[in-house]
Amino acid sequence: MSIESNHTQTAQAAKATGPLVLEGRGLTMRFGGLTAVQGVDIHLATGEVLGIIGPNGAGKSTLLNLLTGIYVPTEGEVLLEGKSLKGVPAYEIAGAGIARTFQTSRLFGSLSVLDNVIIGMHSRTKCGVITALLRPGKSKAEMNRCAERACELLKSVSHDLFERRNVLASSLPQADRRRLEIARALATEPKIVLLDEPSSGMDDRDTDALIADIQRLREQNPKLGFIIIEHDMRLIATLPSRVMVLDYGRKIGDDTFEVVRQLPRVQEAYLGRKASSHHA
Ligand code: ADP
Ligand code: MG
């Protein structure tokens, strides 16, 4: 899949805007003397896919942590469907519709694939371990319902993963762990899914499969929004309608991929060209 072949598609998609589902205004995050994110505005429309790129240490993961309430911004605020999330704890933000995966896997390795998805459900539904522990009498029927729903989710992410629902998560290859994390994020019935470097540790073939998986999920859930931090330029050129570029904590670009790819910093960091030579 070439980067060029996606230009028309991305340009068209960039024009399609709906109501804003998520907004960050003037987000700044300081850790002691270090400013990891500085004055960043970010927004996502319903069903939109936003890519975030930038060199290591640019503040990408910190920005996701601000959007999900894991960090409280030093300055600025986050709004979900127009309502400020100031003072709202991370677990409530997850319940309100912002789900995420992490850069490093946080699966329960000693539980089955299916149980990992079921655990993801408890912030949103009556399913999960908490119910099972607190209300053992009632829990059997509920657990069966949850298991059915978890099976559907696994199938929607990857049929292959569904086939392996009873194996331990720790026995999955890296690419399938990433898929499972996405299935678990979807289990909270989110409005937005934030993915932090979903293709890390994947080869080209797995990355192509991941792109296809996410495209299929979008077709199945047209209102679901995604924010995807990625280093893989094929994924960034294909999935997002808009790409934000972070550099030293600041936003230096926010446009279609065809526009931001011309930025000298992007050429340098991702496209293997020296900043000065891209006119040559
Ligand atoms: P990226 O995801 O773009 O690689 P990060 O958001 O992880 O970047 O980090 C941005 C900067 O903030 C880095 O300099 C990093 O060392 C620093 N940083 C991130 N998290 C913390 C933290 N919890 N405490 C102190 N510094 C942090
Ligand atoms: Mg990161």
Image: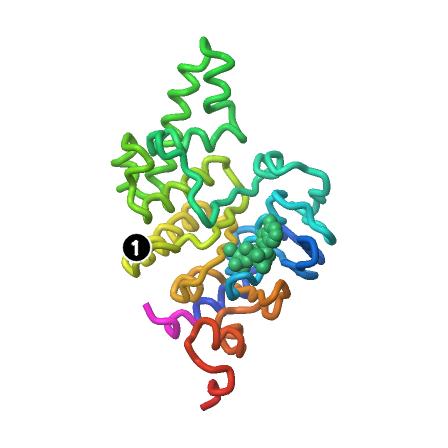
Taking the image as drawn, is residue 8 in sight? yes
What amino acid is found at the position of numbered circle 1 in the picture? Answer: Asp
Magenta stretch in the rendered image = 1-7
Q: Is residue 118 above or below residue 222?
A: above
Residue at point 30% right, 33% down? Answer: 168
Across and down, in percent, residue 268 comes to 48, 76
Residue receiving disc 1: 206
Residue 59 occupies quadrant: bottom right
Residue at point 50% right, 60% down? Answer: 51
Camera-nearest residue between 252 and 156 = 252
Q: Is residue 3 left or right of residue 265?
A: left
Which quadrant does the N terminus fall into?
A: bottom left
Q: Is residue 1 left or right of residue 108?
A: left
Q: Is residue 157 above or below residue 259?
A: above
| Crowd tier of the residue under label 1, counting other residues whose Cα lies within 10 Å: few below 14, some 14–19, many 20 or above | some
Across and down, in percent, residue 213 comes to 35, 50
Residue furthest out toward the bottom: 280
Camera-nearest residue between 212 and 74 = 74
**Colouring of the image:** rainbow
Residue at point 61% right, 70% down? Answer: 252
